[in-house]
Amino acid sequence: MITPVAMPQMGLEVTEAVVAAIHVAVGGRVAEGDPLLELETDKALTDVLAPRGGLMRSVEVQVGDTVAVGDTLLLLTDDLADDPAQDDPAEGGRPVLAAPAAPSGAAVPTAPAGRDASDPAAPPDLRDGRLRAAPVARRAAERLGVSLHDVVGSGPLGRITLSDVERHPSAGLTPATATPPALAEQSVEPLSVPRRAIARRMTQSQQIPQFALNREIDATWLLAEKQRLAAGGEVGVSVNDLLVQALAETVLRHPDLALSYVDSPEGAAKACYRRGEGVDVGLAVATSRGLLVPVLRRVHERPLHEVASERLRLVEAARSGRLALEEMNGATITLSSLAGFGVDSFTAMLNPGESAILAVGRTVEKVIPRERAIAIVATLTLTLTIDHRVMDGASGGAALAGLAELLEGAMAWRA
């Protein structure tokens, strides 16, 4: 029996992924639960596991291929001599993996024009009568009405690529609509999956009416508290952990920060607010794959040492590409810090689905007049970006003032 292994559904927003690694070889034996290949989504790297034990009959994708939910990735079998035509995974709309039977009296097309399937040097896909094509090429062929049996593949082992399909005469594409071959000779690279997701979400963010409020605070007490906690045994607590807990306290005191605007298909008259339970704080993390936002859950209930240890775990998971999808969804509010890059202040863009994001730069020593004298004070600039559909300037200003008050001496840390 042949079992197709398809790209699974990995969250409501995940519709496609890129094949990042293949862990199995054709003919190899696998056990149920073994990792077969690795998919890179816009948020994380995810292993696809074997649904059962068996032999690997074929691998239908290559590293770098873009696949969609439901696309067949591999074929498992009990016996490598199984005939795929007897258990065709094309049923239910899956890609056709075997050459279709010809009508009575008609010749069976076993190879594209110009290719001899009987040639011992022919690629394996032609010798066994099967076509190999990237999933994106299969979808393009179906959309453009191109028969894959008429396309000569230019990829490894005669694999049919998207450009092979687009260049075929029956595709009907003009040079203006097809990908120009000259582009391949230029230094043009496609966006990675994470970068495409960032581009999409930031474009969505630009559609949100948002405004930013700035406030410079005296960070003397905040830095002293970090040193005091370290001396008391809370060695791993950072300024970011203090900011996260103070931000959660601010949300509790200014509950409008926990609202998120929800569009309605019936128009603005039916739009509504959604309020989450508790306070979950997102933390913007720069990684080699782009910006990721892991979420610290129920910060308002956790002591500082738990916040610090969970932050360290999530940051490491984000940078290694091992964050689970559920660890990146549902933040109430997000903290973004560029202090480590020497940035004094900046304005962060809203993460769609949230009503506010706090941007924090580095601490800067400034000469400040104080009580008819001059003092050198460590300052910190806070920039709160707010969804104007949820909050106005007055309520946003009150929330930022409340946060500043906490950070300048009023916060009772949950240690």
Image (tube, helix red, strand yellow):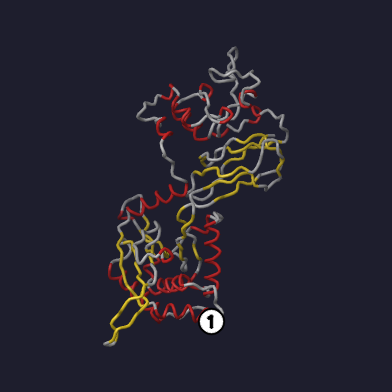
Q: How many labels does the image show?
A: 1
**x%, y% of residue 81?**
72, 29
According to the image, label 1 marks what residue?
231
Is 100 displayed left or right of 197 in the figure? Answer: right
Residue 72 appears in the picture as rendered: yes
Q: Where on the picture, by quarter, is residue 55?
A: top right
**x%, y% of residue 278?**
47, 68
Q: In percent of the image, x 29 and y 84: which residue is there?
A: 374
Q: In this view, does 77 lie above or below 286?
A: above
| Camera-side residue of 65 and 72 | 65
Is 118 displayed left or right of 198 in the figure? Answer: right
**x%, y% of residue 393?**
28, 68
For this orientation, the residue located farthest to the bottom is 372
Q: What is the crowding at mark 1: few (fewer than 14 residues within 10 Å), some, or many (at least 20)?
A: few
Q: Where on the picture, by quarter, is residue 411?
A: bottom left
Q: In percent of the image, x 52 and y 62: which residue is there?
A: 315
